[in-house]
Amino acid sequence: MAGNDLGSLLGGLLGSGGGPGGSGGGAGILGSLLGALMSGGAGGQAAGGNGANDPLGGLLDMLTRSGLADQAQSWIGTGENKPVSADQIKEALPDGALQKAAEQAGISPDQAADQIAQVLPQAVDKLTPQGQVPSGSLEDIIKAQTI
């Protein structure tokens, strides 16, 4: 349920007013992924124990430890966002978290990884407007950016 709420919030943040196939699907799958990480399931352990309290920070830590530090830092920083591939996302995320997010969205893990790769750089960029990861609950961070 948290994933759906996060997906809606992220959709608003990312301007998913477009039709199907726009960033709305990506925002929904990203919300599901962050919900899976917050639930402390597969993502909680992989995020160094901080996945439940700080899913965005935990996700960025996972990406950094998986060799995607340059990409993650480019999204947080104020410059151009470096792209990430679906294969890199699959390598960086725990299988359980990606599987859970895909199941919630009703798509395959490959499709989920592709959608996450498309929307994650923009989402992190918008959630870190000051060039650093803000503290607080993910819902509060998203709401603060959409006001």
Image (cartoon, rainbow, N blue to C red):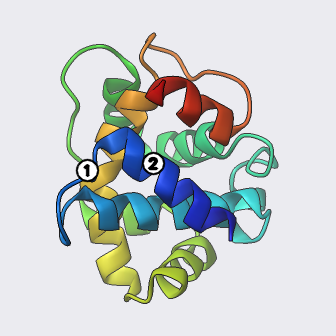
143 sits to left or right of 81: right
Write down the residue under mark 1: 84
Residue 128 in view here: yes
* Badge 1 or badge 2: first in the primary sequence: 2
Give amino acid for label 2: Leu
The number of numbered badges drawn on the structure is 2
From the image, state whether disc 1 or disc 2 is nearer to you. 2
- Neighbor class of circle 1 (other Cα within 10 Å; few <14, some 14-19, many 20+) is some
66 sits to left or right of 126: right
Task: Tell me the element at label 2.
Answer: helix
**Residue sitting at 23 percent across and 16 percent down?**
79
49 sits to left or right of 115: right
Q: Quadrant of residue 136?
A: top right
Q: Taking 9 as reference, is 57 above or below it?
A: above
**Residue sitting at 49 percent across and 59 percent down?**
7
- Please name whichever residue, 45 or 4, is drawn nearer the observer in this view of the structure: 4
Write down the residue under mark 2: 10
Q: Quadrant of the N terminus?
A: bottom right
Q: Taking 82 as reference, is 37 above or below it?
A: below
Give amino acid for label 1: Val
128 sits to left or right of 112: right
Whole-angstrom CA distance, mark 1 to mark 2, is 19 Å
Q: Position of residue 114 (x, y in %)?
A: 27, 69
